[in-house]
Amino acid sequence: MTSTIILATQRTGSTLLCSEFSAMGGLGKPGEHFLPWLRAAAGGARLPRPEFEAIAERGRGRAGTVGVKLMADYLPKLARAWLPPDAVPEADDVAASAAMLLALEAEWGPAAIFRIDRADRFDQALSRHLATATGIYFRTASGEERRDERAGTLSQEAALETFTPQRLEQILQDIALETDFLDRVCARLARPVCVVEYEALASRREAVLAACCAHAGVPEPGRWPERWMTKVVDRGQRDRFRARAEAAWAERRATGLRLPETTRIFAPRPAGAAAAAS
């Protein structure tokens, strides 16, 4: 048995990458299979072995590979729910998370580890804000909306009006912290991690997926599957609010805004980029 592990922060295109991997067949069926149990579990609960096995089956693809997606915000909690208490450092979330990834590999076989990120932090922040404000996390190509009932219920226009410079700053701070956390987890593994950039996946799909297959050591599919997801925010809306935010952002910088130096905010989108999930 082999395994596929995708590491991500919110709104980087990880659901799109999971759907691409699932459709190809050789990379398992990655998704947030641990999340329902984590949401329902009381603090300090241990993940039972039968539930762990059931989660593995939900992620198993046609070739027997188990796939899973793990988000930065709950990876340490998962580690403390599954690993023996004496194997998890009390205050070191990075070490605990790296140990969890190795434990999954020990259970499921050699792991191909992927990390999806987004070059344009403004787009990521806008997407994160709209998802939590409207409850709409993505749309299928047929127009069906997939919602999270625990999130907000604002219309998209109302949600866009609440996307203030202060809200943007707050989300960017969260993204910077989560990204730094996954950087340190990957460094702790001391092994190759395939980094997928969302913008490249959207604009150069087949080349990116071919590189993913090569990283995992699986053959490319004879025919690339049809993409079934579409964007939640259309380009016109995005560009209108991006222009307004860039002007406001210049004012915020002038008032002493501080973000980690590595935080990218407004990255240029590749010319002719194809539509993809937010």
Image (cartoon, rainbow, N blue to C red):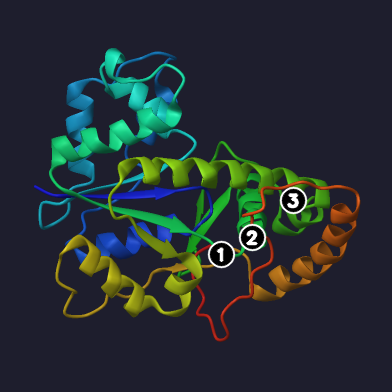
Disc number for residue 168: 3
The residue indicated by pointer 2 is: 264
Closest to the camera, between mark 2 and mark 3, is 2
What is the spatial separation of the Cα atoms under label 2 and label 1, in whole angstroms? Answer: 7 Å
**At label 1, which amino acid type do we have?**
Ala
- Residue 36 visible, this orientation: no
Q: Nearer the viewer, residue 168 or 152?
A: 168
Q: Where's residue 175, x and y in %?
A: 60, 47
CA neighbours of label 3 inside 10 A, class few (<14), some (14 to 19), many (20+): many
The residue indicated by pointer 1 is: 119
Q: Earlier in the sequence, mark 2 or mark 1?
A: 1
Q: Nearer the viewer, residue 229 or 214?
A: 214
- Please say if the residues under marks 2 and 1 sit with CB atoms less than 8 Å apart: yes
What is the spatial separation of the Cα atoms under label 3 and label 1, in whole angstroms? Answer: 16 Å
* Secondary structure type for disc 1: loop
Compared to residue 34, the image places residue 235 above or below, namely below
Disc number for residue 40: none
**At label 2, which amino acid type do we have?**
Arg
